[in-house]
């Protein structure tokens, strides 16, 4: 008798408790307070349109960042506002490295679409353990890709100046880790990047104050993934991916600086990371 | 089958008959029996491959009927190698407001487990590989060294993190929001302690869910649980400052048996320093498992999620009812429904899901 009472109470109390979710009063679609009379959250709750700002506000932020955000994002794949563009556009998939997550102009070959539509070669359909996105929503994302996968307007959270997306400063990598990914908040004149202002050096001690310990790494190549804003990875020759601490320097000052699209020197950029051999 | 294995098998069957139990790789079962996770799993913290006891139990005490196929499968190929696996496939119907209803069939996962006992009872190598759907993905791969008295162990490699109740359901708020689940193993080391009434783990990992390490910090996970025959109480703390995005989580969790009902509860408090102001979240779960007949379990769960303590009217609930039926060994059928309830502006937070799942295990 007690058992039946307990189960009965649970069956009644459960739905009652579950039926009292938040009223959403004063909030946008993402559950953030509405400010300034708008709908807040960068457009959350607005009609989905084929641009990154709208997709971010209506899909990536409210749905994907439940998992794909922060340090514990699965496979390091983050879809928060600050990371989404650089992590997606022209970025190789970790699960199927031969495919780009977003291949501008080619939604069918974009791994993002394959994951959303459920025919990717690896892993489950996204969003994981939720109803798949309506095809109409996926079609809008397809249209954004078909249109060239343009970035969101400046100021939406993209990195200022030039900044490392992955690895971050002083990160420790294995030899098989993806090439460093660097992004700007605007367009660079890529022709101004040359051997005089781009250097890659390796130090076995991790210090770069002893010239005898520092080796210049030759053969680094830029793999440009986006021109505006400029996003590129820095591919090191396999023979040069040896254990040690690396320092990447892009000089935006001095006699031959890297320039932005308006001809202005961008200032110096450095990135240090370490490649370790697995035991 | 060796004489020693026969004894272990018979002992497992005998104990399971004594306690009138059903074996299932879920925490509620441990609560019902007063067992620790290590009773049935290779991993002392639970989840993944079942040990000999767990395998035999799953074939003899769990199902409504036991089909006689001779000696039970123990997973042991020989003294040094054991294997196991799970296949979960499902059909589901999802109704989301303002969207066309969707029904689909899926292979949720096919996992294979391999344990190589390089030095039996002392040193082992373990792999948990998800081989479907799609390509192969490694979930766990580690080595574990036990002390001679089998109380302490050291584990190194890629592993699931010790934190709270290790529910099978990764979509539960307590697993999804904390980010500690079967989809986010991490690389590092873990020290564990096992005694008759205590189970504790301390893990130091990269804090990047299997990604590259960072210079900014590591993830520290501490979990301790006191287990008695009809109740248990535990607490966990997790701190992650990798990539400079500091997150601190703490929880308490408990289990108690009241007759044929096993109760599970967990409450989590999460604070994220990388939000301005600091974001604080609360997640909770209460679950009742009514084992109303041999091979049958009715699971009722209610969950709560407050995504930001400083924002009003934004909380979410989820209510689930699931019937779990194990007709005979190696096969379980689960049929259930889940109701999500959140802010009305977000359709996904207000969906309803009905599903049927088969779980083949060996």
Image (cartoon, coloured by chain):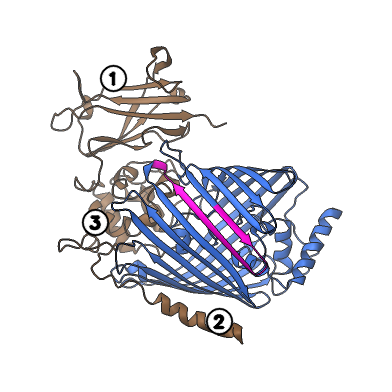
Which of pointers 2 and 3 lies earlier in the amino acid sequence? 2
Co-location on one chain, circles 2 and 3: yes
Height in image: B251 above or below B144? below
- Region in magenta: B223-243
The residue closer to the viewer here, A108 or B282, is B282
Mark number, residue B244? none
Which of pointers 1 and 2 lies earlier in the amino acid sequence? 2
Mark number, residue A54? 3
Co-location on one chain, circles 1 and 3: yes
Q: Secondary structure at mark 3?
A: helix
Residue B240 in magenta?
Answer: yes
Q: Position of residue A116 (x, y in %)?
A: 38, 56
Is there any visible trace of residue A41 in the rendered image? yes
Q: Residues within 10 Å of mark 1 (few under 14, many from 20)?
A: few
Q: CA distance from mark 2 to mark 3?
A: 47 Å
Residue B196 falls left or right of residue B87: right
Quarter placement of the N terminus of chain B? bottom right
Residue B164 falls left or right of residue A233: right
For image coordinates 18% across by 31% down, the residue present is A260
- Residue that lies at the very extreme toward the top in this rendered image: A212
For image coordinates 45% across by 33% down, the residue present is A173
Q: CA distance from mark 1 to mark 2?
A: 75 Å
Which of pointers 1 and 3 lies earlier in the amino acid sequence? 3
Residue denoted by label 2: A6
Which chain wears brown?
A
Residue denoted by label 1: A195
Residue B109 in magenta?
Answer: no
Height in image: B180 above or below A267? below
């Amino acid at each position: 008798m007690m058992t039946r009472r307990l189960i009965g109470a649970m069956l009644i109390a459960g739905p009652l408790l579950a039926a009292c979710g938040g009223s959403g009063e004063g909030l946008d679609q993402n559950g953030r307070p509405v400010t300034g009379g708008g709908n807040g959250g960068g457009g959350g709750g607005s009609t989905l349109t084929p641009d990154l700002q709208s997709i971010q506000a209506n899909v990536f932020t409210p749905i994907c960042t439940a998992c794909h955000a922060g340090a514990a994002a699965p496979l390091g794949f983050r879809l928060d506002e600050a990371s989404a563009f650089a992590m997606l556009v022209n970025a190789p998939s970790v699960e199927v490295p031969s495919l780009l997550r977003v291949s501008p102009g080619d939604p069918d070959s974009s791994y993002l679409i394959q994951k959303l539509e459920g025919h990717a070669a690896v892993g489950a359909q996204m969003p994981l353990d939720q109803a798949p996105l309506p095809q109409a929503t996926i079609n809008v994302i397809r249209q954004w890709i078909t249109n060239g996968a343009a970035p969101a307007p400046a100021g939406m959270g993209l990195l200022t100046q030039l900044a490392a997306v992955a690895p971050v400063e002083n990160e420790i990598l294995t030899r098989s880790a993806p090439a460093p990914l660097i992004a700007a908040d605007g367009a660079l004149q890529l022709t101004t990047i040359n051997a005089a202002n781009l250097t890659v050096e390796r130090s076995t001690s991790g210090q770069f104050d002893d010239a005898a310990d520092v080796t210049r790494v030759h053969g680094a190549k830029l793999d440009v993934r986006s021109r505006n804003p400029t996003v590129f990875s820095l591919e090191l020759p396999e023979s040069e991916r040896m254990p040690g601490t690396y320092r990447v320097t892009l000089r935006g000052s001095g006699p031959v600086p890297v320039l932005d699209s308006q001809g202005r020197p961008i200032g110096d950029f450095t990135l240090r990371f370490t490649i370790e051999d697995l035991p | 089958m060796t004489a020693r294995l026969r004894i272990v098998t018979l002992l497992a069957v005998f104990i399971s008959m004594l306690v009138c139990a059903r074996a299932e790789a879920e925490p509620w079962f441990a609560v019902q029996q007063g067992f620790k996770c290590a009773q049935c799993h290779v991993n002392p913290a639970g989840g993944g491959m079942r040990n000999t006891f767990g395998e035999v139990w799953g074939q003899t005490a769990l199902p409504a009927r036991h089909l006689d196929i001779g000696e039970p499968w123990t997973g042991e190929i020989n003294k040094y190698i054991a294997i196991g696996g799970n296949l979960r496939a499902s059909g589901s119907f999802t109704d989301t407001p303002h969207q066309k209803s969707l029904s689909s069939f899926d292979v949720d996962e096919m996992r294979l487990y391999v344990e190589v006992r390089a030095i039996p009872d002392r040193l082992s190598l373990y792999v948990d590989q998800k081989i479907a759907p799609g390509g192969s993905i490694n979930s766990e791969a580690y080595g574990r060294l036990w002390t001679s008295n089998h109380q302490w162990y050291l584990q190194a490699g890629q592993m699931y993190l010790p934190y709270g109740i290790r529910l099978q359901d990764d979509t539960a708020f307590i697993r999804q929001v904390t980010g500690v689940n079967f989809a986010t193993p991490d690389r590092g080391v873990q020290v564990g302690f096992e005694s008759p009434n205590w189970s504790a783990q301390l893990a130091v990992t990269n804090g990047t869910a299997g990604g590259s390490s960072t210079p900014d910090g590591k993830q520290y996970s501490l979990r301790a649980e006191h287990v008695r025959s009809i109740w248990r109480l535990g607490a966990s703390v997790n701190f992650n400052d990798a990539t400079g995005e500091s997150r601190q989580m703490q929880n308490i969790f408990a289990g108690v048996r009241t007759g044929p009902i096993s109760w599970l509860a967990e409450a989590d408090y999460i604070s994220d320093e990388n939000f301005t102001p600091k974001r604080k979240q609360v997640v909770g779960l209460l679950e009742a498992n009514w084992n109303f007949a041999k091979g049958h379990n009715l699971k009722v769960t209610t969950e709560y999620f407050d995504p930001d303590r400083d924002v009003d009217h934004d909380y979410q609930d989820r209510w689930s009812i699931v019937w779990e039926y194990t007709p005979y060994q190696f096969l379980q059928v689960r049929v259930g429904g889940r109701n999500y309830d959140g802010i009305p502006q977000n359709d996904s937070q207000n969906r309803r899901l009905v599903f049927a799942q088969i779980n083949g295990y060996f």
